[in-house]
Amino acid sequence: MENLVQNIINALQWGSFYALIALGYTLVYGVLTLINFAHGDVFMVGAYIAFFSATFLLTTLGLPGWIALALCIPVTMILTAMVGVTLERIAYRPLRNKGAHRLYVVITALMCGLILEHANLAIFGASRKAFPQLIAEHVYTIGGVTFTNLKIAVIATAFLAFLFLHWMVTRTRVGMAMRAISYDKFAVPLLGIPLDRIIVVTFILGSGFAGLAGLLFAMSYPVLEPYMGALIGWKAFIAAVVGGIGDIRGAFLGGFLLGAVEIMVVAFFPSTFRDLIAFTVLLLILTWKPTGLFGIAKTTKI
Amino acid sequence: MKRLLTTLSISCIAMIMAVQVIAADTIKIGFNLEMTGDIPKVGESSKFAAEMLKADINGAGGLEVGGKKYKLEFIYEDNEAKAESAVTTTLKLIEKDEVLAMIGPNSTKQAIPAGQVANDNEVVMISPWSTNPDTTFNRPWVFRAAFLDPFQGPMAVNFAIKTFKAKTSAVLYDLSNDYSKGLAEIFKKLFESKMGAGSVLAFESHGTKDQDFSAQLTKIIAAKPDFIFLPDNYNQVALIVKQARQLGFKGEFMGSDAWGSSELMTLCGKDCVGLHFSTHYAAAGATGATKEFIERYKAKYSYTPDDVAALTWDATGVVLKAIQNTGGLTGKLKKDRKAIREGMAAITSFSGITGNMKFNEQGDPIKCGVVVQITKNGEFAFNESICPE
Amino acid sequence: MLRRYSVHLSLATVGGLIVYLAHQEYISLYIMSVLMFMGVNIIMSTSLNLVNGYMGEFSCGHGGFMCVGAYVSSLLGVWLFAGDKVFGAPLLNPKYTLYAFPLLILVGGIAAALAGLLVAIPSYKTRGDYLAIITLASNYIIISVIENIGAIGGSRGFMGMKQLINAMGKSVDLPWMPIWVFLFTVFCIWLMRRYISSTFGKGVIAICQDEVAAEIMSVNTNKIKTITFMVSSGMAGIAGGLFAYILGYVNPGSFNILKSTEVLVMVYLGGMGSLSGSVLSAILFTILLELLRPLQIVKWIVIPLLLIILMQFRPEGIMGNRELGDIFPKLKKFYRFK
């Protein structure tokens, strides 16, 4: 019983990261139907930005940990958002304006991810970076179940981020414009909605939250390396699709679902079968619900 | 016109001769390294160590072989941590760059196919880091510098039983990493044969790029083992130990030589203090050549060398010694390579910085290992030395 | 008459020339190995183009099928013709290796085609990016299964295929691996062309245009999808078998997502739905990877950058959906491309 509760907490924490990254995937996809494969690497860049700003604030300026953290969050989110927007401006928008097939934009995104990874490797070398401790970590044990303040913070942030994005998309004018674009990209400019500006906002939101995920990830798993975003990026993409890509709720739920499946498989089966069982479960979910948990079937079979 | 042609051709011939003269005075050694891909740090460490050795020898005028000084030329090639790339890299080094011997690849995934190619083409290859028996098995031209899993496994078992007075243990290893998997299996077999069946309470695995181990650790901690055996790369060790502490585990960890990186302590911090692992040499309290190597490496690249760097240094040293053993190079590639192969076999004792070694008939080194403990200052202090019987 | 057979003749000449040069050691083994991997890449990119280009799906787990082919053909080969610590003494006399070798590779291909059902059956209901996830998941599943079978080495990999190559060389002293790679590459391209220009191929293109409309026009979409996925993954299996025998060693880690994305890049570089584009891009990509070797780490910045720039100027890949014959109409006299 204790084990089960413990594993639920583990799953919630791990799922939070998937959820945060999947949110970025799904935002961009919802608006542009573009699978932004560079997203995992934007997340990695976010973690590195967090690392550099945290070290700068802590050691050079000598600020106390919690002030550094409070400053670090906006700095990381803004800078990472800028990286995301730059990618959009340089690589994706020209292609979109040329009317290229959407899969060519996907391949371009894949290439951008490779460039981010290897540029990092070339500039900062192969040494892994240790993220400095920003806030003291407390281990609490209640009835055999152990958790830390950081874990709670991560889970809470994921929920807050989801609520914010959900509010943004469903309740604001920008969100309405986003949904309109995803509904009909050609009619929207006719109604006076600035298409490119809305797309930029989408990238700001998606990348900003990837940056936030990067910061939290670096705090929880303080080992940074250039390839850290690749695998988690792929898996978050899987989570987003299983949830029903293009839907905020789907990405959020999908992230937690994937986290839970991975953790629970390890907890109750031999851990060598983790990938095998976890992906078989996902495959079955997609065979049962071919458009994910929240996706809407676009074409109907006759 | 005719004169022009003659001058041209003469100058051409002169240039070719000049090139040959230069070529005759250099010894080319190829390095087949993992500079991009999964484990860039391994390739980088190897390259740094080799660069340092090259600078040393060339600074002293070159390597003396049979009374003649040769300059060293090291050619580094990236095998992208891919098996197919390692094969083409090997062939390129052997045929296009005409190297006399090849160092690397480090990781087994690349070293096995590359070793096949090197053996078929009769070029000496020495892998600094690969621990899989298949890399050198039945390949007279392939050698290695690291000790094998069947030696390191018992080291960990005996040490844990003696020092921790452990009755039970648990293992967490990397499923996709054959080094980790091999060592974990050997450990399990030996520990159970000594402490009775079922004394390994949990035998769990994870994937190579995983960052979260909470589920495996929850399972392990619930089984309440006396200690956890962790044959894993240092970057994952840092995460695993931290997460285990966060989940309330207070017991011991025992590690393997893949822990032996200075980065372990920058990544892991105080959580790793006091833990033990088996390795090739103890950096803290090292004496003689080992100490000198560590200090110079640290001064040059501003971090303590890891085991790959030390093993590459030794592997390269062994090859250079074999070249010296030939007693003079003829300049004929095939003949010289063969002479180097014989020179390798003729090495009876090589005192490297990772201990004294010689090669058995399979091309595997026979050398001692040490168990070190991590001190408060983050140094790896000598605890016990274990030699093969 | 001559025109009709010109392609066959030129292929035979090129093949013969390569074999002769390799036999006489005019081509170094290094160039030869690059050429062989080029052949494997050509098979991979053309076969993926069948699904991604012609059928308009987005499969990003092609490496998994390559893995199945590689493992099945090498396990079978070593079991039948070579002594090994897993299987013991060979079942058949190694001197028959030469005749059985193409069968071994084909069996690997068939096994991979069966593994293709893993993707084909969900594709009846699932489309687009949801199917992409299924392909991705199947790649993970295949690798995970092989890692868990300890008897064939798991993550330690499997070897012993070199003995078969040596046995073939003993029967007839020729460089057999280049010959087989060349023959199978030609065979796969031929098969692809025949498949695309058959009625099945028209059905495949119809599915790409509009699946519902295709079904109304009495195209049996499920049947066509199943067969197309199986042909595509079967060819990937053939490529995998060749890959395993070229290396003499297989390891599940060689066939992960990275391998799959590499193939994806080749397909889109060449152009969706262009056979000659896929072949060209596989050749270009392999050469580029080798030529830029001296750049080391920077190579992996330069190559994606080159591709991004290329996409900006040619947002439909090198060939778009055209064939060589559309660009150089005179070539059509010698060969019908579609």
Image (cartoon, rainbow, N blue to C red):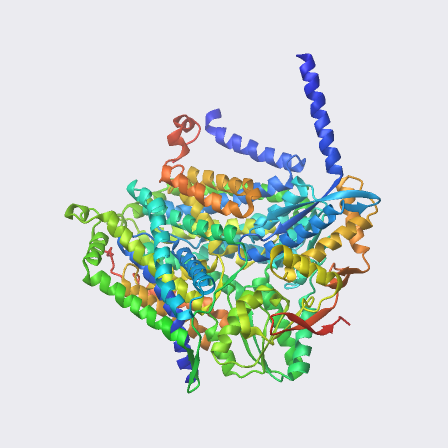
In the picture, measured across the screen, residue B288 lies left or right of residue A302, that is right
Q: Position of residue A252 (x, y in %)?
A: 31, 66
Q: Is residue C235 left or right of residue A19?
A: right
Image quadrant of residue B313? bottom right
| Residue B98 screen position, x and y as percent | 69, 41
Of all residues, the one furthest to the left in this rendering is A191
Residue A167, position as x, y percentages in the image: 23, 65
| Residue B169 in view, yes or no | yes
Quadrant (top left, top right, bottom left, bottom right) of the C terminus of chain C: top left
Q: In the depicted view, which residue is nearer to us: B105 or C118?
A: B105
Depth check, front residue: A269 or B323 = B323
Q: Is residue C126 visible?
A: no
Q: Is residue B230 left or right of residue A69?
A: right
Residue at left 55%, top 40%? C291
Residue at figure coordinates x 32%, y 68% from the top left: A253
Q: How many marks?
A: 0
**Depth check, front residue: B77 or A261:** B77
Residue extending furthest bottom? A143
Residue C141 relative to residue B34: left or right: left
Residue at (43% x, 42% y) in the render:
C307
Residue A214 percent across, percent down from the top left: 40, 62
Tell me if residue B36 comes above or below residue B180 in the rendering.
above
* Residue at figure coordinates x 80%, y 56% from the top left: B347
Residue that sits furthest to the front in the current view: A61
